[in-house]
Amino acid sequence: MTDHLRGDEPFPAAARKALGDTQLRRNIGHATRTIRTKRLAAVAECPDWEELRRAGAAIKDEVLARLPELLEELERNVTARGGVVHWARDGAEANAIVTELVRRAGTTEVVKVKSMATEEIGLNEHLQAAGIGVTETDLAALIVQLGHDKPSHILVPAIHRNRAEIREIFTREMPEVTGLSDEPRELAMAARAHLRRKFLSAKVAISGANFGIAETGTLAVVESEGNGRMCLTLPRTLITVMGIEKLLPRFTDLEVFMQLLPRSSTAERMNPYTSMWTGVHPGDGPQEFHLVLLDNGRSRVLADPVGRDALRCIRCSACLNVCPVYERAGGHAYGSVYPGPIGAILSPQLTGTRGHHDPNASLPYASSLCGACFDACPVRIDIPSILVHLRAAEVDAERGGLPGGQDLAMRAAAFAMAGPRRFAAAEAVLGAGRALAGKDRRITMLPWPASRWTASRDVPAPPTETFRQWWRRTRG
Amino acid sequence: MRIALFATCLADAMFPQAAIATVELLERLGHEVVFPDGQTCCGQMHVNTGYQREALGLVRHHVEVFEPYELIVAPSGSCVGSVRHQHALVARRAGDEALARRAEAVAARTYELSELLVDVLGICDVGAYYPHTVTFHPTCHSLRMLRVGDKPLRLLRQVRGLTLVELPDADVCCGFGGTFAIKNADVSTAMLADKMARVLQTGAEVCSAGDASCLMHIGGGLSRIRSAVRTVHLAEILASTEERPR
């Protein structure tokens, strides 16, 4: 099974390739710039935005503190209203449960609501390997599926595609479509016609969940297109895969999150479609409802008192849209289905890392720590601090073995900075670097690893007099 | 007032003009500046690269050196950010609660230059003269760790002869990020290229900032393309006068 939470190569190497794709950079740059401008306006309309963020963080912290009892409360209430709850320790268990449920429903075709939990476990691949046809019904997810591609953004999985590329994919993959232009309306109508047939024939739908309410057993999906609503209401059987952290204790908690999520994700005051369902109702909607509760590493994250804040995430994507690293490298460079700043703290924690060669061990370093993500996060996840925490955990895990070049450099720097005499001595050594500079006092080439700096940036020649020398000369 | 200067290791070793300007500016404003010569480095590079154990000694050293002083200033948003937001964390992670408390006490008395001038000393017009067109990069840690807001701009607007031009996308990172610039050199360079394009677009002759580190990055890029824009620390502009222009 492909690992959907881990790429094949470390971030710097993957990002280097992505940077060379100028079309990708134009597409992502345009899209993220548009959405972050809109988000700022949508957030500025709320005079109590900071209070909302604090409330959102507090509710999610309560969920994490009371997770076992709230999950059992959810299970009781879903069951009491005619649903069936399944527990999955990992992706393999969840995939097996869903596949068996689809088989039992006697069908080989399912429609899907866009869902990160099912992306995370590679459910589509698993179902297809079992001979079950899967149709993604979210427009962007459909573009990714038809393009035999991977999602590159949590909210807009096809953000790396422009409309000309979408036109090509549709023309190639939808045999019934001819003479399609790249007008957004025409593209949407083609997808609509393509999907309508699937909605009317599907017997099973699979969804994720934005929220699961412990108090009532209610599940909620928010979306923009109405395609999710079709999946949640038309087929006879509904299977929902939900990460265990997606809980809310009370129905009234939605008040906070229904303000935070749309403004942070699509920069809308209110999303067009909010679907909520509680169990099953004879003669109305799905007659069979299954809820698969997915752990898949979340308990491991919960055990880390600093890193666990990542489980507050409501998958809005605001941190991706404001991240200068994401904007340039794109989502695929992160390897995992969770890209961007939240992916950089979530993916390595969900999978755990096996030494510094693990591609996910490179993710906590895929940030300049500029802090734009923390400012944008609707549940106040201090992503920069968690990145720094995970870096320390990574370095500490490697201690005891043979020190690498970076270890030696950092130890040498700590030694040199331990006191003023050593520091002055180090400055004297640094000053000798003036010999490397030309007459114009620029250093343009240094040996590895500083060559990674001088590949694109000069360094000024060290000064003839350090500050402490100047101080001694003029004030001492 | 008696103000202790935390010069920062980078300014001390590589960009002394920023620290010298801070001294001369504060002295011109009638304050006494002292330089605790035991100082070395705040340890931010170690913390941000994952070497918190190595940073612990540097944190303890910094606290011991600066503990005797009532008011501390550094010409760097990033280093003050480290003192304020990381020192106590590093101490607590190592289980040293006493050091964490002492670090918090030192941090509460430590200010970035524009904070010291505007918030503590209550001045926006420092009597500077700098007859150049300047654009200002606000630096991420000044903006988002310290929340200095428009304090540097309020100071620059009062400088005689200075034409301030707005930097588009000013709040976007220049791509420095400490060892990020080495570990993720390609992404860092892509971010720098966009920052340089914005700087050049303003037509300014000087790009200024409150951090020598970000200026080293932006300046290193501008130097590589042999641009006519030079990088100058905020302190140097504020220290410049008609009698002694810089």
Image (cartoon, rainbow, N blue to C red):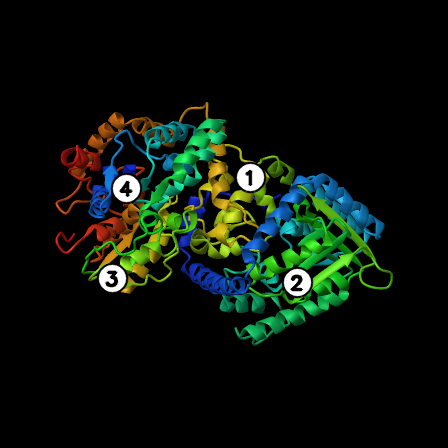
- Please report contact status of discs 2 and 1: CB closer than 8 Å, yes or no: no
Q: Is residue B25 above or below residue B5?
A: below
To which quarter of the image does residue B165 belong?
A: bottom left
Residue A158 horizontal side relative to residue A80, left or right: left
Q: Which residue is mark 1?
A: A307
Mark 3 or 4, closer to the camera: 4
2 and 1 marks on the same chain: yes
Q: Which residue is drawn at the image coordinates 57% and 61% (left, top)? A: A263
Q: On screen, B23 above or below A153?
A: above
Tally of numbered discs: 4
Looking at the picture, which amino acid does disc 2 mark? Answer: Thr
Q: Chain of mark 1?
A: A
| Residue behind mark 4 | B1
Looking at the rendered structure, the secondary structure element under dot 3 is loop
Discs 1 and 4 share one subunit = no
Which residue is identified by label 3? B204
| Figure quadrant of residue A69 | top right
Q: CA distance from mark 3 to mark 1?
A: 43 Å
Residue type indicated by callout 4: Met
Q: What is the CA distance from the residue labelled 2 to the residue labelled 1? A: 33 Å
